[in-house]
Amino acid sequence: MVSAIFHGPVDVADMAEKASEKPIAAETREEVKSIPSSRTASATKAHALPLRKRLVDRLGAWFNHALPPLLGLAFLLVIWSIVASSGSIPGPRDTWLQAVQVFSDPFYRNGPNDQGVGWNVLASLQRVGVGFGLAALVGIPLGFAIGRFDFLSRMFNPLISLLRPISPLAWLPIGLLVFKGADPAAIWTIFICSIWPMVVNTAVGVQRVPQDYMNVARVLNLSEWKIATTILFPAVLPYMLTGVRLAIGTAWLVIVAAEMLTGGVGIGFWVWDEWNNLNVKNIIVAIFVIGIVGMLLEWALVKLASAFTFEEVKA
């Protein structure tokens, strides 16, 4: 028995179309497999170009940040070497060797007046911390009051203008006379000299608060405490931190001069003692120590100011 299968015209057309698609799909797969390697190489080059550009940009940024300070340091060393060639002061190499010797044992104790540079720096920082802290406790609230009330501003501005330019060495004998001791006199000198930047900057910040803020506080009938804590303090904070930065630099300058006269343990006394011993190398080492510690204090306060303000703080 013979059976026959009959296909309609539509089925025949579909079968022909499927048969024609098979070699096309095979040809497409062959084309995909036979993509030239030059396209991969061009993609690799295109990826390498941005990477090379990023490396060049990073090197350029590093040179822009690192090269000027290095050139400044090299300029200082050249000038120092020229001055030292006359024999008046030790040169950079001799000072470096002396610094290595000094910092090989910075915390030795051979008596109350013979201690390592580490103990002297810590003693100076302790006095600076006490005097500076007292100045902040008094100066910042006083600055708020002066900036907030016009009567107090007109009352204290002449006094501030009179007392601020006075040298710390002029305040030191008053401290010795009143407090009858070297440490309290040094702390008093730090206090009276570092309080003015905080008072002035805080008062200026309060006076520059936008009047719209104060109008809103008046409409809401806020108390003076609420105005100070919710409106004035956030707006005045950048000015206040600027005053704190200036005050810590002033305090570190003052303590060196005060310790030269009061004696005891401290970096200022160490400089004066080395001068009495005619050890100029240690004096130059102490100068660099004073500068580095002051720079670190400034850097720490810049970081603190950056953490509490939205504005970029520049050193």
Image: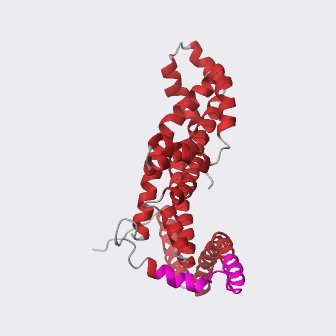
In the rendered image, residue 66 lying in the magenta stretch gets the answer: no
Residue 315 image point, x, y percent? 62, 56
In the rendered image, residue 98 lying in the magenta stretch gets the answer: yes
Res. 74 image quadrant = bottom right
Residue 24 image point, x, y percent? 54, 77
The relative height of residue 46 versus residue 186 in the rendered view (above or below) is below
The relative height of residue 110 versus residue 98 in the rendered view (above or below) is above
Instruction: Considering the whole magenta stretch, tell me its main secondary structure.
Output: helix
Quadrant in which the N terminus appears: bottom left
> 273 or 199, which lies in front?
273
Name which residue lies at 53% across and 67% down: 271
Residue 143 image point, x, y percent? 58, 32
Task: Judge from the rendering whether residue 112 lies leftward or rightward of residue 217; answer left or right.
Answer: left
> 308 or 247, which lies in front?
247
> 286 or 39, which lies in front?
286
Q: Which range of residues does the magenta coloring cover?
A: 74-100
Residue 269 image point, x, y percent? 49, 63
Res. 264 image quadrant = bottom left
Name which residue lies at 52% across and 61% down: 296
